[in-house]
Amino acid sequence: MASFASQISSVLLFLLFTTTFNRVISCNENDKKLLLIFKQGVVDPYNQLSSWTTEEDCCLWEGVHCNNMTGRVTKLSLFNHTLRGDINLCVLQLEFLNHLDLSHNDFKTVSMPPCQISKSPFDAHKFHNQSLPTHSNQSACFSVALRYLDFSVNGLVINDLHWLSQLSSLKYLDLTNSDIGNENKWLHHISMLPSLSVLHLRGCGLTDFPSLDYINFTSLEILDLSFNCINSIPNSFFNITSNIYHLDLLGCNFYGQLPKALHHLQNLKHLNLSLNNLEGSIPDWICQHEQLQHFEIYLNQLNGSIPSCLGNLSSLISLDLSHNHFRGNLPKSLGKLHNLKSLSIDGNSWSGVLSEKNFANLSSLASLALSSTSFKFDFDPNWVPPFQLKYFSSANTSLGPNFPTWLYTQRSLERLQISRSEISNIDADILWGFIASIDEVDLSNNFISGDISNVTLHSRDIRLDYNNFTGGLPHISANVMYIQASHNSFSGSISAFLCPRESNRAENMLSILDISHNNLSGSLPDCWAGWKQLVYLNLRGNKLYGELPPSMALLTNLHLLSLCDNGFSGNFSLNLSHWTNLEYLALERNKFSGGLPNTMQQNLVVFKVRANQFIGNIPTQLCHMSFLMVIDLADNKLSGSIPPCLYNIMQFDPRTLWTFFYFYKETNLFSKGRELNYPDLLSRYIVDFSSNNLSGEIPKGLFNLTLLWSLNLSRNHLTGMISREIGDLKNLESLDLSYNRLYGEIPPTISDISFLEVLNLSYNNFIGQIPLGTQIQTSESWSFVGNPQLCGVPLPIKCNKKEAHNPKLVEGNEDDSFLKSLYLGMGVGFAVGFWVVCGSLFLIRPWGQRFFQSFDSLVDRLYVHVALTLKSFHRIFGTS
């Protein structure tokens, strides 16, 4: 008992000693100085490093880890801390630092200023107010303990990597998304790391390999060079990296056949050559990599048949041959890969029959992609697969007409994509219960029919669009986030869907609701308070009518609202001042009246209100929307002038709107006289104010919108002349100014618009010759009719010499009018002056007598002067 008590006492004493010791040991002062030097170059907009103060023990600072026994900093991890600025490499002088992670921030540069510090005691107050001591003539001494360095996903520009060679113990290096393309010796500096086993250089701007002389990578095991443009790798490189087991060359712009030098990598377990331009067939030597587990070569130009020896690679876990040009039958030998978990063969030109025999032994299979293949499917209806899939895709195939009954055995499915699979026959009693547990379901673009108004959908993401569903809309549970049910024949009121009686939940999680192009009718119910998570709401192409309910103003998270092609009426009274995310507002072809909405936020990209009954002026608030790409106000009753401040719109790079283009990959646009569906909006800048009651002149600022693709101001009451700046619209493909009261000559600069396909200037008051230009003369004559004083091709009216002019000599209508006025004024002034003087002399006799007497006297004097001068010259020359 005494011995046991003694042991307990010893343990308690040890714990007390350890706790006390840990409380006494604090951060090393020199480490603290180096960390604060590092912080000087950091921009911390969200105050993530607020704990980094001189008063606080640096071992308690955010991201800093110390050794409990010595107080020395061993790890600095600031992953994803939204930091910016400069990475000061003085941090590498932390003597015992073995792990440094600054990844997923926004650092742009790496610097190595002189930063050695003295070993003198640390005066916190003095340090806070003075710059740190540095010694520029001394070389940096980096930590020999550093094993892990991660600067990835910052967007760094590193032009010099010589400092890497000092990190002799480094095993892990990740510079992903750093620009090191200007460092010609990057490979040599990295090869100086004798212990390096993991190297990630994904997307680093590399274009070629430097000389391989004196390069040694015998310790390298994982190499990621993906998303560079290195085109090819010297064969000798694979001789000095023979221990690599993970090689990622995705998106490197490789050409030709698979590099035969890969045969030297006998330890290869992961090989990714996808997204290149590789050609030819898969060579048989690939089958000699017996340890290969992941083989990915999707999105290349490979062709031929698949070597049956791939079935001997029993270690294969994933095989991705998708989106090449492979043809022929799928080798039955692949059915022996009992360890295979993922098989992707979609997007090829396969032939033959695919049946359960191809998958008989794939007991580990969890992912199967067969989309866009030409197989003839012949599965036994009673087949029970040996696997349980999590993902299955057969889009763009002839899987139907019956829904595959073997899928009902797959109770682990998380994603099911069978769109465009020619399915028309389903067992409704089984199908809707089966898909209830699947997270993502895509049944779109089939021929499935039936009334599903009594079905409750539970999938988080479900697509039913482009089918033949009838009856009312189905019910949805609270966890549904995305539902697309457009282009069906759903009918009846939307009230039962939006305001279910049995629902006790306060709010739904639904983010995307697309029930456009159906036969839904009635007015919108006033119960939108429970749908505040909506981001995308498309009700286009139904038979809905009435005024918008007030509760719709609560949908402040909306990015898109489309109410087109319905019968909505009344004022558009929704207060959009809090809709800060709204990017797409389409109200076309309804019966809205009153003024245009004037509470819109500046993030708006598409604003379409065509074919309504809006009145009043165009709100100047539109001028503050610099992101606008499409503004269509056509066919309303708008009046007043076009705001001159519209030159402020369309001043941005559309590629920055990643949110917009993620959701809205296509839209309907009215241009070139018709409405078409466009798959993208990256260059579709449109202004359409046609068919209104607008008056005044066309503001010159409108011609400063150099990105404009289509401009339509037709069928208004616009006056004035076309500014010569119209030639600055270099991207314009459609211009319609017809049916206005414009006058003057057509400026010759219009010929500078080289992409112009549609031009309509008819029914105005233009005069003179039509400017010469390929795009102009190839227009139809109707483009200029209704202008009686216009002549020249393509009109049949020829111009006479007075009307014809060289457009190169005329700088513009405004300058020509000014010169005409100037010359006319000079002529009139000369005539008036001449007759005022001469008339006075003839009509007023005393003035005339005095003028002629003076004139005679002047002539006499001039005669005497000339005679004397000539006599003098005669005397001089005669004497000589």
Image (cartoon, rainbow, N blue to C red):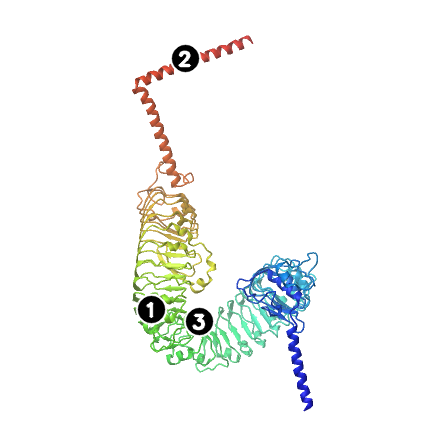
Q: Nearer the viewer, mark 3 or mark 1?
A: 1
Q: CA distance from mark 2 to mark 1?
A: 107 Å
- Amino acid at dot 1: Asn
Image disc number at residue 708: none
- Amino acid at dot 3: Thr
**7 relative position to 50: left or right:** right
Image disc number at residue 397: 3
Residue 648 locus on image (x, y percent): 42, 52
Q: Nearer the viewer, mark 3 or mark 2?
A: 2
- Against 11, residue 160 (above or below) is above
Rate crowding at label 2 as few (under 14), some (14 to 19) or many (20 or more) other CA atoms within 10 Å: few
Image disc number at residue 518: 1
Q: Residue at x 44, y 11 (%)?
A: 864
- Against 41, residue 347 (above or below) is below
Q: Secondary structure at mark 1?
A: loop
Count all numbered tags in the image, as a single digit: 3
Q: Secondary structure at mark 2?
A: helix
> Is there a contact, CB below 8 Å, between mark 2 and mark 1?
no
Image disc number at residue 860: 2
Q: Earlier in the sequence, mark 3 or mark 1?
A: 3
- Against 651, residue 327 (above or below) is below
Q: Quadrant of residue 600?
A: bottom left
Q: Residue furthest top?
A: 879
Q: Depth check: 527 or 651 in front?
A: 527
